[in-house]
Image: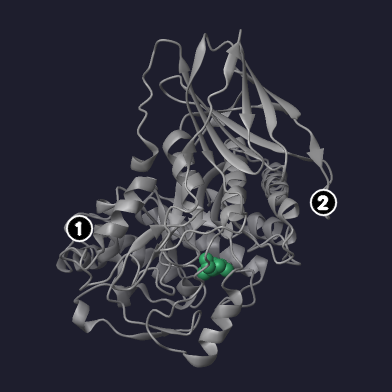
Amino acid sequence: MKRASLILDKDYEIGKVDPRIYGSFIEHLGRAVYGGIYEPGHKSADELGFREDVLELVKELDVPIIRYPGGNFVSAFNWEDSVGPRDQRPKRLDLAWYTTETNEVGMHEFSDWLTKANSSMMYAINLGTRGVDDARNVVEYANHLEGSYYSDLRIKNGAKDPFGIKVWCLGNEMDGEWQMGHKTARDYGALAREAAKVMKRVDPSIEVVACGSSSLEMPTFGGWEYTMLMECYEQIDYVSLHRYYANYEDDTPAFLARSMDLDEFIKSVTAICDAVGAVKRSKKKLGLSFDEWNVWYHSRQQDKEIWKQDKWNRALPLLEDVYNFEDALLVGSMLITFIRNADRVKIACLAQLVNVIAPIMTRNGGGVWRQTIYWPLLHASRFGRGISLQPIVESPVYNCWDYENVPFIDAAAVLTEQEDVVIFCVNKSMDQHIALNCEFRDFGTLTVEQHIELHHDDVKATNTEAHPDEVTPMDADKGKFVDDTLEVLLRPLSWNVLRLTKKNKRNIEIKPLSTI
Ligand code: AHR
């Protein structure tokens, strides 16, 4: 059997985990809104038409922030279309996804839904086809108390209290030539600076996210960030990163190694931000907003077929990836990577939340179920809040086509406010159990309250409406302590959550897994 070790010291802090790293994303795309969170006439629909069965799963995930309304959609979106009397809202062609947007759900309805979901809005503005003027107007509409044209219009439209949107995205993927209103780095940086300036004059309490590269593969990556930040560094708060992974080669070890690429991406963007800060002699440090991340590839061919047959319909079933067990392992490793970079990654939105590359799936008129990737997000969001601790891991390694020395054990650790310790850990070995020795320094005497394990013998196993629990977490062996060292066995290909508390404290709420 292989062995690995992990040392945790209470004083080795990476930083506070910003709960917003457990955020998500809902775009007006496919069946995310229409047929996802919203389906009037469905048996679980509330008085506004929102599905309560879907809402329950969203609440269970406890996502503190949700990016909205796009994505690519936002780059030709007129926010005014989505407010005011619903029967007078225009239907528009959505040129990003070849759909007709009916605007039945807009800023007010989504805000009402967010209140029910215990979440908050991260609003993306259109910096593709629109500009500075619209940027200030939408902030005035959403956040100004009263007594101005747009704030009074909001009140007339039924929302006496401002929406109080704290985080604003300055456009979406503006480096991509597919983006409507795509710009050069310098032009975008200047526009982001001026938009941020007027938006913050309307509401100085807001934070803004400037678009970084839409992926690491963009030929402009790096140069885009540097040039854009030279224009707007002092006016913005975060740089966005987007990252989606695929397993077209059907190579599980290589696929699971993509978390190394994610870590490098984070380190590279951090370095560029700090380089610009140094050039500008600025004391300010920018945060990173991973405002789109996930596995995305299963549905790409299917989407091409849909568009061949059916353009311009409402709510086409687009980007409906059916996630398998190995996808859940990589999503777990990506969450681990965010926790380990808690000093810089302040926001992360799993893209997306319902039906569209999502942890939650629905059938129109039918049920709702949890995809495999739901589970690591749930565990991280529920148990991964507190201080991220630096785990010192010694693990056997493997090689794959683009990475050497990939540790089989990928781990992050959090010290919660209640002083409980939570370790998240993926064993990437295809066939080997790994005995993990965890040494705890300066925590007092700990005991393992729970070891949650997600495993399936078939990496391609999925959850479906008929078999919603095919891939589902189980309680696993808690291992045993010898002095301050815990030895616990991690199954090959498994996502693990070890929840430890001070001996005799017993303050961790342990619910049966079926209820979390
Ligand atoms: O999340 C799906 C799409 O992926 C978003 O609209 C876009 O920003 C990204 O390319």
Nearer the observer, 102 or 511: 511
Q: Residues under labels 1 and 2: Cα distance?
A: 59 Å
Circle 1 residue: 146
Query: Which residue sits at x=70%, y=67%?
Result: 248
Q: Secondary structure at mark 1?
A: loop
Nearer the observer, 66 or 358: 358
Could you tell whether 299 is left or right of 405 in the image?
left
Circle 2 residue: 400
The N terminus: image quadrant: top right
Q: Position of residue 234 (x, y in %)?
A: 57, 49
| Placement of 120 over or under 43, stated as above or below | above
| Placement of 104 over or under 26, stated as above or below | below
Query: Which residue sits at x=67%, y=26%?
Result: 436
Could you tell whether 116 is left or right of 128 in the image?
left
| Placement of 442 over or under 51, stated as above or below | above
Q: Position of residue 410 (x, y in %)?
A: 67, 37
Q: Nearer the viewer, mark 1 or mark 2?
A: 2
Quadrant of the picture in which ligand 1 is shown: bottom right
Question: Can residue 285 be seen in the rendering of this structure?
Answer: no
Give the amino acid type for the residue marked by disc 2 in the picture.
Cys
